[in-house]
Image (spheres, rainbow, N blue to C red):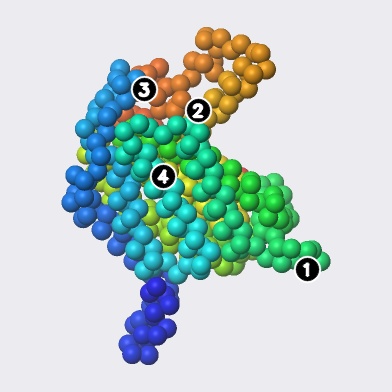
Amino acid sequence: MLYYLSSLLTPFWGPFRLFQSHALLLAGGTFFAALLSAALLPRLWDRLPRDHGKAILKDMGGMKSAGKPTGAGFYVTLIALPVIVLFAPLRPWDFAAVLALYAAMVFGYLDDRSAVPWGELRKGLLDAVVSVAIALFIFLGHAETIDGHAGRYMITWVPFVKDIVYVNAWLYVPCAAFILWFVMNATNCSDGVDGLAGSLTEITLVVLAVFLYVVVGYRPVAHYFLIPVYAEAARWAIVVMIVAGAFGGYLWFNAEPSRILMGDAGSRFLGILVATACLMTGNPFIVLALAPVVLVNGGGGLGKLVLLRVARRLGFQIGDDSVIKRIRFPLHDHCKKNLGWSNAQVLMRFILLQLIIMPILLILLLKIR
């Protein structure tokens, strides 16, 4: 809103032209969201439902969270929304995608509040609907017509391929929807240690914002790396950093021993935002480089579940002493139960792994093409 108002207000006072600067909007939005989140959360969290703990993990401290306010992601994302409206100059289809992100958050919050947790099928179908909607909104807002080809195509770039790839709606929407669905659920599964999912995702969001703003959204750098320029990338960088700022305020209170928990409302929102922003870079595979630890930690459990069910359907028996059965998922549970790590060790070591692995994968993805 400030971006569009600046052209109307500048004739009355020259400094209003500064709101045309994406850098100023990004910095201002991030700071304002963090300040609001840190100031308002303590006044709001008493209205949240209380966590019941995880009795199945009581030998690993699963009951330590019992009684703490959960679902704080609901308030954090709501705090971020007016800041997004104020600072991020989004076009209609992009704003529709943002609203779909909030639908995923609301479903998570309703599950948090439910006396009986929603079943896998119900949650999976709702996740699929939201994921397809976001993928469709991105395509409608950013697909282009290509000379000599009928219809519209998404201009994408992929690892190990130098040329630009043009993808039609029938391929783009289902593939993008699967990525959105998987990353959202992997992030949700990673939420189990104070500060873990939030801290890992904060790192991803900050790097994503820099990548969107400095690489994909800046023509000289994009041309150097032989990737297409996305005109809206800088605006999505503002959205990403506003959310990072808001969840930074939440993490202030979520540091161990935590006072509040973000619940499914926050973890699902963060996961699907990361996937959406990765799609906005033009390379859907970049999520593998920017969220490696989250995908292995939470997504490994989804992969293990699918593998075991497929093996059972095919008549294969996987013994309890096999490697796949011995490794617990999410992986942070394996580290606590089988390796004897404390919560603080899990958090610090997972963050270090993310900081080491991320730049290596990102450089390989950019340069080997």
Q: Where is residue 123 shown, x and y percent of the image?
A: 47, 38
Q: Where is residue 138 shown, x and y percent of the image?
A: 57, 58
The earlier-in-sequence mark between 3 and 1 is: 1
For the residue pair 306 and 128, the one nearer the viewer reads as 128
Which quarter of the picture shows residue 112?
Answer: top left
* Secondary structure at numbered mark 2: helix
Disc 3 and disc 4: Cα gap in Å?
Answer: 30 Å
Q: Where is residue 288 shown, x and y percent of the image?
A: 56, 42
Residue depicted at x 51% and y 68%:
91
Q: Where is residue 245 shown, x and y percent of the image?
A: 34, 55
Residue depicted at x 59% and y 12%:
318
Residue furthest right in the image: 148
Query: In the rendered image, which residue does mark 4 sit on?
Result: 107
Residue furthest bottom in the image: 11
For the residue pair 222 and 25, the one nearer the viewer reads as 25
Disc 4 and disc 2: Cα gap in Å?
Answer: 21 Å
* Secondary structure at numbered mark 3: helix
Disc assigned to residue 301: 2
* Three-letter code, disc 1: Asp
* Three-letter code, disc 2: Gly
Residue depicted at x 39% and y 63%:
84
Q: Quadrant of the N terminus?
A: bottom left
Disc assigned to residue 336: 3
